[in-house]
Image (spheres, rainbow, N blue to C red):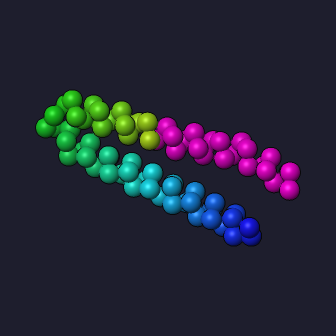
Amino acid sequence: MDELPFLVKLIRRVRAIVLWIVATFFAVLLYFDFTEDEDVAAILKSILIFLISVVVITIIFKKLFSNRSKDEE
């Protein structure tokens, strides 16, 4: 059970890295596809905005609730 916090931290970091890779991939697709098809660009733009908002909400959530977990221990 001592390894559980390490595994949780590792999973969270991998999830964050994958999220940034996906966001970057969509940003590159948006850049190259913007002039070719405006419908695809609109979909990619909305997905990119969603991913960025998820990252921002995650950061805000960590800032607000990180102190409570430290206080309980």
Q: Which residues are magenta?
A: 52-73
Image coordinates for residue 3, horizontal then vertical, percent: 69, 70
Task: Report the front residue among 12 and 66.
Answer: 12
Overall secondary structure of the magenta section: helix
**Residue lying at 29% horizontally and 33% vertically, measured from the top left:** 43
* Numbered-mark total: 0
In the picture, residue 7 is in which quadrant?
bottom right
For the N terminus, give its image quadrant: bottom right
Left or right position of 46 against 36 = right
**Residue 72: within the magenta?**
yes
Quadrant where the C terminus is found in the figure: bottom right
Q: Return the residue found at the far left.
A: 36
What is the residue that sits farthest to the right in this orientation? 72
Residue at 80 percent across and 46 percent down: it is: 68
Given the current orientation, which residue lies at the most extreme front position? 1
Pinpoint residue 50: horizontal percent, then vertical percent: 43, 36
Image side of residue 41 versus residue 63, left or right: left
Q: Which residue is depicted at the point 32% across and 46% down?
A: 27
Where is residue 53 drawn, in percent x and y?
A: 49, 37
Most foreground residue, 71 or 7: 7
x and y percentages locating residue 39 in the rendered image: 21, 29
User: Which residue corresponds to the image point at 30% horizontal and 37% vertical from the top-left?
Assistant: 44
